[in-house]
Amino acid sequence: ATVVVLASGTGSLLRALLDAASAADFPAKIVAVGVDRTCAATEHAEAAGVPHFKVALNDFPDRAAWDAALTDAVAGYAPDLVVSAGFMKILGPAFLDRFGGRIINTHPALLPAFPGAHGVRDALAYGVRVTGSTVHLVDAGVDTGPILAQEAVPVLPDDDEASLHERIKVVERRLLAQVVAAVATRGIVSDGRKAVIPDERV
Ligand code: GRF
């Protein structure tokens, strides 16, 4: 399976995925990395010799034009899967029409709890004792798509946002690679609201 990864941040998730995909027996090939801003993720793509492109919102007259440009840029690689690894933009209708059902996102909380751009901070502020990582399909909402995998992560008494987020990222890096490999080999079966990877062992 061919995969395009979208990122916006430090790219530690992208790096973990690139590392996993470098194994000869990994069932997916990352063919390109797309970013919406200049960020460290681009450096990880360069280091791995993977093509990368930037489609920045402020380079376009409006969101629809950005949505169309991102869709075309990703479509150029004809991916089987699009993986959002810390991509901090809501994917637009053109993108969802083109790739819907095969866009995977990872969120650093146990959805449906604490969706949005500050899931770690919100969980910490709420005082939960357990949070975690969710890997899910992207739909038109914000972190509302069908869940593919989750794993719990404890919140420690002296945690701050950074320490908790890093503990979650350790889980995310493994879980995301596991889900990408599982989906690449076994696909996804959607049953209404639910999405299942056959013979789920993720
Ligand atoms: C990850 O925790 C991801 O779940 C969230 O943004 C973070 C990206 O981290 N959406 P990095 O940029 O890959 O280090």
Image: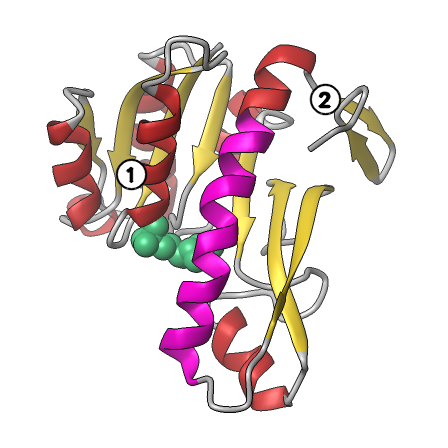
What residue is disc 2 on? Answer: 188
Q: Is residue 201 left or right of residue 12?
A: right
Q: Amino acid at mark 2?
A: Ile
Q: Is 16 contained in the magenta span?
A: no
Image coordinates of residue 45 in percent, x first then y, are: 19, 30
Residue 200 at x, y percent in the picture: 78, 27
Residue 68 visible to the viewer: no
- Residue 15: assigned label: 1
Specify whether tag 1 is near ligand 1 (CB below 8 Å). yes
* Part of the protein shown in magenta: 160-180
Q: In the displayed structure, would residue 168 be above or below residue 114?
A: above
Q: Residue at x 30, y 29 (%)?
A: 69
Image quarter (top left, top right, bottom left or bottom right) of the C terminus: top right
Mark 1: amino acid: Arg
Answer above or below: position of 14 versus 161: above
Looking at the rendered structure, the secondary structure element under dot 2 is: loop
**Residue 105 makes an appearance in the image:** yes
Secondary structure under the numbered disc 1 in the rendered image = helix
Relative horizontal placement of residue 162, taking residue 90 as reference (left or right): left
